[in-house]
Amino acid sequence: MASKFAAASLLLALVTSTYGNSTFITYQPAFKDIIGPSPKLELLLQNGSYPFAHEAPVYYQTKEDVFMVGNYQTKNGGQPIQISKMRAKNGVYVREEIFPDIPMANGAVNYKDGVLFAAQGTFDRPSALIYMDPEPPYATEVMLDSFNGRRFNSLNDVVIHSDGSIWFTDPTYGYDQGFTPKPDLPHQVYRFDPGTGSVRAVADGLGQPNGLAFSPDESILYVTDTDSHRGNGDNNPERAATIYAYDVKTYSNAPFLVNRRVFAYTDNGIPDGVKVDTNGNVYSGCGDGVHVWSPGGDLLGKIKLPSVSANFCFAEAGVMYILNEYKVWKATLSPDTHGALLGL
Ligand SMILES: *[C@@H]1O[C@H](CO)[C@@H](O)[C@H](O)[C@H]1NC(C)=O
Ligand SMILES: *[C@@H]1O[C@H](CO)[C@@H](O)[C@H](O)[C@H]1NC(C)=O
């Protein structure tokens, strides 16, 4: 007997291209426009002993370098988080460890000519926003290391608004993983204006605010909430694994976040890093690779990997570098797909 659900299950089955177990999976036809007719996945780097490819990835166009941050390994308690630079040398990708003074780095974003990191801090060093020169010796400068004198919990990720302001999240993963003091602030999102020095909370009521990204016209801020994974092994599927959207509205000449709504809930793992393309599609690193939603919140497709992707970055047209803990992948999508952060 013909099923009225046949069309839906057909779409679910469309696997576009494979590399081992890694594939492009199309849920809605619009995904084809994003990945183009011949999408490709290549494994660039791997390391069997250290998860060097966890967070940040920032594409530094001048040198075509990608900066990335490793994952904290509880079993080696006290081990600093490693920062690496990936460079293509004659078509061969190499990773070099670098040692800027950034205590327990996590997320990062292109800022001015360099990279702005969210440093989670330690028992001895405050969590902070730290600028890094992208050229050796990778000099650093602390931009903000407290909320008007009160220490942050453990800053996680950061984005820049075109008005020059810096927006960032402050969950409690540092404390949950045992390397920062007991939290002293709610789980919030903040905005810092480096021009005036004004720092303010812009969103609360989140479990573990994590990745964040503006829509291309900056009318919407997306914030991922990874509360279902607490970082101390307390994982619970009844808590958020959700991307929230807020409208960015101006009142009394200042920006406020209003109309918080569920933009998307992921079917696998937690939505960690989040980015948008120039058409407003929303990408997030989840338990089985990178998921892609339309601006209206429909799951369009997945760049499916065998395991978790916490974050990724767009580089040149159609090129995305995907961090997969012990591995780095290059996804080649349609040349018409451009990340909104750099617009390349
Ligand atoms: C594919 O996945 C299966 C099951 O998870 C695993 O045993 C196998 O090693 C994977 N193959 C590759 C090439 O990753
Ligand atoms: C794996 O990464 C660790 C930490 O960065 C490094 O010491 C080691 O040399 C790497 N192994 C290989 C085979 O690259």
Image (spheres, rainbow, N blue to C red):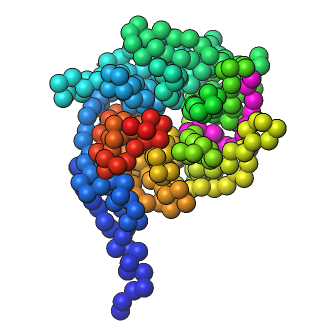
Q: Residue at x 36, y 89 (%)?
A: 2
Using the rendered view, name the quadrant where residue 324 is placed. Answer: top left
> Is 210 covered by the magenta stretch?
yes
User: What is the residue that sits farthest to the left in this orientation?
Assistant: 90
Q: How many marks?
A: 0
Question: Image check: 224 left or right of 152?
Answer: left
Q: Against 35, is 73 above or below?
A: above
User: What is the residue that sits farthest to the bottom in this orientation?
Assistant: 1
Question: Image check: 82 left or right of 10?
Answer: right
Q: Tell me the quadrant of the picture where the N terminus can be found.
A: bottom left
Q: Against 204, is 181 above or below?
A: above
Using the rendered view, name the quadrant where residue 232 is placed. Answer: top right
Residue 170 in percent (x, y) is at 65, 31
Q: Residue at x 29, y 45 (%)?
A: 332
Residue 53 in percent (x, y) is at 38, 31
Q: Against 225, is 87 above or below?
A: above
Residue 343 in percent (x, y) is at 43, 38
Q: Residue at x 48, y 56 (%)?
A: 293
> Is 60 covered by the magenta stretch?
no
* Residue 210 visible: yes
Q: Tell me the quadrant of the picture where the C terminus can be found.
A: top left
* Residue 168 visible: no
Over which residues does the magenta segment extend? 198-211
Residue 79 in percent (x, y) is at 47, 18
Q: Residue at x 32, y 18 (%)?
A: 96
